[in-house]
Image (spheres, rainbow, N blue to C red):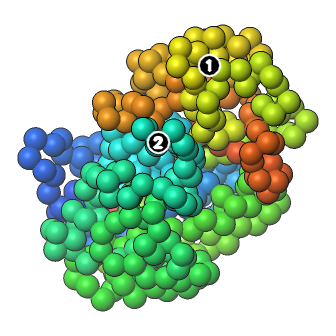
């Protein structure tokens, strides 16, 4: 099987979106840092609103433009960039918030190993997780924008305020809770209008949720896109003339039939030599007993064949899957890394909750359906 293409981090990725918006708002880069404004060139503005629609992959959006007139009107200005590997929310939020690739910020999956503690934890729930600011110490672009004098407002569901993931990847400025998308748009408009220099961030998660439950090709997913399109049109129309609007996402999604999945609980050959499983069904970190990595990689390759790319940690890192990896983050990566191809999902019914096993839509791997996300930047009408 051909080697999968690694995400092209150097030519523009999700990690460049927020730094590029901040550059357009006059937030300076640190000494020795590149100037991000050339990556995703964005004209100057006084104020900016950034919306991240969880699960709105570039491919899924392109196929549904007939249901999204506002997106369709801006199709020519919409570019696609890779989210990063693994293509999953916790990792992508790290890239989005810090402006660095996964290997640098170290938030490397849904579930990852805590080196030295011989356990995995969930980077979404953060239950029992490390101190978030120590796990991910890089200054976020929200923090940088606040230091530069912008009014920074982050809008999402109330339980995000002070959560481990928020503290690790999206800290900075103030948080305002709102539940419905319409309410969040209202808050965003008030926030951006109330300050002469502002950076407002709005998160919406229902597209992802419905894609997981019903599949990314479902009626439910499409209906939610229609709702999102209407609210984004309202948001764009209500912005001050000197405010820009940027829309992006954290990953795409594929449908994974239940009857073609591989369940590790039923596969003794896939459990031999394995200490812990992490990651997710489309991008699995396999943490091995000492000296067992090569045998584990061989067993997983033999069982999964052309349905997955199975690589030793060193191979995945050398191939650039995670971007440049900081030495301190290497041990968080599985001894063996498995990126699914086609519609394969690798599950473990012995440890996964039934609600997770029931999901239809999944993501994480290196396919364009999962990796590529849209970036739509609507410039301010006046600088």
Q: Quadrant of residue 38?
A: top left
The residue at the far right in this view is 259
Percent of width and height locating residue 337: 57, 26
Q: Looking at the image, is 139 positioned above or below residue 33? A: below
Q: Please give left or right for residue 357 compared with residue 205 in the image.
A: right
Earlier in the chain: of badge 2 and badge 1, it is 2
Dot 2 lies on which element? loop
- Badge 1: few (under 14), some or many (20 or more) residues near its Cα, within 10 Å? many
Q: Quadrant of the C terminus?
A: bottom left
**Does 202 sit above or below residue 115?**
below
Name the residue: 54% across, 43% down: 119
Residue 272 x %, y %:
71, 20
Is there any visible trace of residue 343 in the rendered image? no
For residue 117, which numbered disc appears in the image? 2
Taking the spot 66% from the left edge, 66% from the top edge, the residue there is 206
- In the rendered view, would you say 231 is above or below 81? below
Mark 2 and mark 1: span between their CA atoms? 25 Å
Q: Is residue 267 above or below residue 232?
A: above
- 340 and 74: which is toward the camera: 340
Q: Which mark is residue 310?
A: 1
């Amino acid at each position: 099987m051909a080697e999968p293409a690694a995400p092209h981090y150097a030519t523009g990725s999700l990690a460049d979106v927020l730094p590029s918006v901040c550059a357009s708002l006059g937030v300076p880069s640190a000494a020795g840092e590149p100037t991000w404004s050339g990556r995703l060139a964005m004209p100057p503005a006084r104020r900016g609103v950034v919306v991240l629609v969880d699960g709105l992959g570039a491919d899924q959006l392109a196929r549904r433009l007939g249901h999204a007139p506002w997106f369709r009107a801006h199709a020519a200005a919409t570019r696609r960039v890779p989210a990063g590997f693994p293509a999953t929310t916790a990792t992508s939020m790290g890239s989005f918030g810090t402006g660095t690739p996964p290997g640098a910020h170290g938030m490397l999956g849904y579930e990852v190993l805590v080196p030295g503690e011989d356990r995995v934890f969930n980077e979404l729930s953060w239950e029992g997780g490390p101190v978030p600011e120590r796990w991910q110490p890089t200054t976020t672009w929200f923090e940088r924008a606040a230091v530069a004098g912008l009014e920074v407002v982050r809008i999402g569901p109330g339980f995000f305020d002070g959560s481990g993931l928020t503290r690790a990847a999206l800290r900075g400025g103030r948080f305002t809770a709102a539940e419905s998308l319409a309410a969040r748009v209202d808050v965003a408009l008030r926030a951006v209008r109330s300050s002469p220099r502002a950076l407002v961030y709005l998160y919406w998660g229902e597209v992802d949720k419905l894609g997981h439950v019903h599949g990314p090709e479902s009626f439910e997913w499409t209906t939610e896109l229609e709702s999102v399109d209407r609210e984004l049109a309202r948001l764009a129309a209500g912005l001050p003339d000197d405010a820009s609007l940027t829309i992006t996402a954290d990953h795409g999604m594929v449908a994974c039939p239940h009857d073609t999945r591989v369940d590790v609980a039923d596969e003794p050959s896939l459990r031999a030599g394995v200490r812990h499983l992490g990651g997710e069904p489309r991008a699995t970190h396999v943490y091995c007993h000492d000296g067992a990595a090569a045998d584990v990689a061989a067993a997983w390759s033999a069982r999964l064949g052309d349905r997955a790319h199975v690589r030793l940690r060193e191979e995945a890192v050398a191939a650039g899957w995670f971007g440049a990896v900081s030495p301190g983050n290497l041990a968080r990566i599985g001894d063996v890394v498995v990126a699914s191809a086609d519609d394969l999902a690798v599950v473990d019914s012995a440890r996964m909750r039934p609600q997770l096993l029931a999901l239809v839509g999944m993501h994480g791997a290196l396919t364009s359906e999962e990796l590529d996300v849209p970036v739509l930047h609507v410039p301010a009408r006046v600088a």
